[in-house]
Image (cartoon, helix red, strand yellow):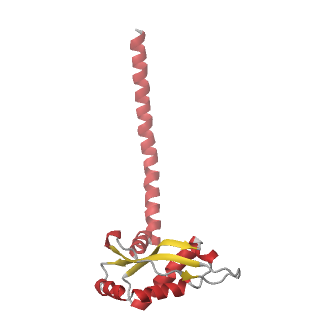
């Protein structure tokens, strides 16, 4: 008899729980719908969806469409004097990433192959302006990459060049 009574009690509590869950669902559903409509209206007014899509697609290239143009390590670059009467030099290698979907990719690829000395000269001119303490700073290295990227794009008159990267970056 006790087992039957406990079973009936558990069944009654389960039914009460189900009723409360249904009540909660119907109580919160209108407020969720209103909140969703409010968020939709705000994003529509601010045009977040279109702005984020256009910002994400602007200047972004699929990684599969990038080709690396790696130059062998150039001769060391003498760094600017920092007033310590010590000479500092930088040993480096440079990789230029090209967007192979760009319309002038083939032309730039062959032009880069033929003008590696110009790339080394531009790199020497930009990097030679910095001192030893500056070139070991990661933020300055990013700045150097950005300057080189801008110079390469201007010199070769292209948007095919996507980024500039260094390897074996050793300052002494």
Which image quarter is the C terminus in?
Answer: bottom right
In the rendered view, does 43 fall on the left or right side of 62?
right
Relative side of 42 to 138, left or right? left
**Residue 96 placement (x, y as % from top left):** 40, 78
Is 19 rendered above or below residue 108? above
Residue 111's place in the image compared with 54, above or below, is below
Q: How many marks?
A: 0
Q: Picture quarter containing residue 70?
A: bottom left
**Image-quadrant location for residue 112:** bottom left
Residue appearing at x 50%, y 78% in the figure: 145
Image quadrant where one finds the N terminus: top left
Q: Residue at x 43, y 70 (%)?
A: 52
Query: Residue 7: x, y in percent?
Result: 39, 18
Image point 46% across, 47% down: which residue?
28
The answer to whether 41 is drawn above or below residue 150 in the figure is above
Location of residue 48 by image quarter: bottom left
Q: Nearer the viewer, residue 31 or 109?
A: 109
Q: Which one is in front, 169 or 108?
A: 169
Considering depth in this image, is 165 or 92 the residue closer to the camera? 92
Position of residue 146 measured from the top left corner of the image (x, y, whole percent): 50, 80
């Amino acid at each position: 008899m006790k087992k039957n009574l406990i079973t009936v009690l558990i069944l009654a509590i389960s039914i009460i729980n189900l009723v409360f869950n249904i009540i909660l669902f119907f109580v919160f559903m209108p407020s969720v719908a209103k909140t969703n409509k409010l968020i939709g209206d705000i994003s529509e007014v601010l045009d977040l969806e279109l702005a984020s899509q256009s910002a994400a697609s602007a200047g972004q290239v699929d990684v599969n469409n990038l080709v690396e143009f790696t130059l062998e390590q150039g001769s060391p670059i003498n760094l600017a004097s920092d007033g310590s009467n010590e000479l500092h030099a930088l040993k480096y290698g440079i990789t230029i990433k090209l967007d192979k979907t760009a319309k002038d990719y083939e032309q730039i690829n062959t032009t880069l192959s033929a003008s590696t000395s110009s790339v080394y000269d531009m790199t020497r001119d930009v990097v030679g302006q910095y001192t030893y303490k500056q070139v070991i700073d990661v933020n300055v290295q990013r700045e150097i990459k950005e300057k080189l990227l801008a110079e390469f794009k201007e010199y070769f008159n292209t948007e095919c060049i996507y980024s500039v990267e260094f390897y074996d970056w050793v300052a002494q």
